[in-house]
Amino acid sequence: MKAILVTGNNGPDSLELRDVPEPIPAPNEVVVRLQAAGLNFADVRAAQGKYPGGPEAPFIAGREFAGVIESTGERVMGYSQQNAFAEQIASPRNLLFPVPSQWDFEHAAAFPVNYLTAWLAYWKAGLVKDEINDSSPVSPTPRKRVLIHAAAGGVGTAAVQIGRQLGLEMFGTASSQEKISRLRELGLTHPINYKQEDYEERIAEITHGEGVDAVLDGLGGEHTGKSIRCCGFLGRVILFGSATGENPKVNLGSLYIKGTSLHGLWLSKLVSKTELIAAALRSMKPWIESGSIQPQVGAVLPLEQAAEAYRMLLERRNFGKVVLRVD
Ligand SMILES: NC(=O)c1ccc[n+]([C@@H]2O[C@H](COP(=O)([O-])OP(=O)(O)OC[C@H]3O[C@@H](n4cnc5c(N)ncnc54)[C@H](OP(=O)(O)O)[C@@H]3O)[C@@H](O)[C@H]2O)c1
């Protein structure tokens, strides 16, 4: 079968379309014939040899996909650590989820990582509940505020859509006016072009110094310290990535001042919590069925053009998800 192999640590230049053996499923796995696969920032980092704990080259890239189970014909979307940029994948059954009937495979391939990560970030922030493990109601009043970094990205657009369903007042950062306009259309309350204005000052101004209740931080570097300062009393910063390529720069002592807390989130680990993932999917189901949340697919490229897809993410040219079509 055809697959995108990462052959070294040179990012897009290390990707090669190769013929590789078809996967042999383990006893708990089924083979999925892929139709589409979603590209994640983690894939870009992994092809640079910079993904923490990531596989060493050579390996088949890709961590989310949509297709058909060979033995049953079911339409599924799935999550995996690697091996998704290929014609087939062997996947454990518990990491496969049914594709909503109104979605094509390209939208389905854009769902698992972004929406599960965004939902889990809100859960960590105490803004959405896992009905099984948490019986406390999420209070709808007063209206809660969230800051979403890289709001025009994959996780960012998912967080905007979910935040809208949760009735949040949302602040979101992006680097260009085009992204800002599209985010406004998506329902983001306060888009901020951080190349033109300081988001920390702007949030203080709009909230009259009260700050936000939560920050979704996939950037790291100096943004994590700023995120803490954007929080109001008892705010929570959910740290799930370092798209800046830098470790978070944080003065932990600054957490005392407003009782702020800093939470880590890694889907690779949380995905093994089957009940939690089921709760996330149950919580999002009505929004999916009503069409209120729908993965933002910014571009679709054939598998052969994986290198160009990686460059789009590296050069920050994507809005939402870049999807690879597997023909
Ligand atoms: N922990 C987890 O389980 C988990 C799961 C999914 C994603 N993540 C992380 O979440 C972050 C977002 O992932 P994603 O797949 O949704 O990617 P993405 O948002 O589609 O792309 C990253 C965005 O980050 C912004 N950015 C800021 N500084 C950047 C820099 N120096 N280089 C490149 N981009 C920069 C860019 O937006 P602007 O142009 O608007 O600045 C860019 O579009 C990544 O750090 C990723 O590793 C973590």
Image (spheres, rainbow, N blue to C red):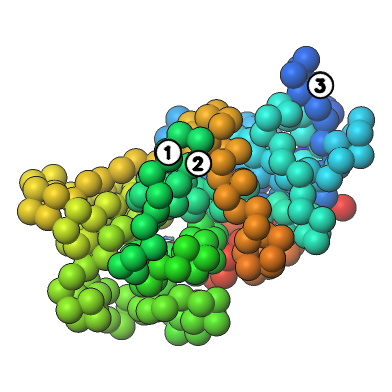
Residue in view at x 72 percent, y 54 percent: 108
Ligand 1 falls in quadrant: bottom left
Q: With 186 as the anchor, is 23 left or right in this view?
A: right
Q: With 272 as the anchor, is 295 left or right in this view?
A: right
Q: Amino acid at mark 3?
A: Ile
Quick one: SS at disc 3?
loop
Residue in view at x 13 percent, y 45 percent: 252
* Image marks 1 and 2: residues in contact by CB distance under 8 Å: yes
Mark 3 nearby-residue class (10 Å; few <14, some 14–19, many ≥20): few
Whole-number angstrom distance, CA of label 3 to CA of label 1: 39 Å
Q: Is residue 196 visible?
A: yes
The quadrant where residue 69 appears: top right
Q: Amino acid at mark 1?
A: Asp
Rendered image: mark on residue 131: 2
Mark 1 nearby-residue class (10 Å; few <14, some 14–19, many ≥20): few
Q: Is residue 119 depicted above or below 183 in this figure?
A: above
The quadrant where residue 199 appears: bottom left
Earlier sequence position, callout 3 versus callout 1? 3
- Residue under circle 3? 24
- Where does the image place residue 163, in percent across and percent down from the top left? 47, 64
Whole-number angstrom distance, CA of label 1 to CA of label 2: 5 Å
- Where does the image place residue 285, in percent across and percent down from the top left? 65, 53
Quick one: SS at disc 2?
loop
Rendered image: mark on residue 134: 1
Number of on-image labels: 3
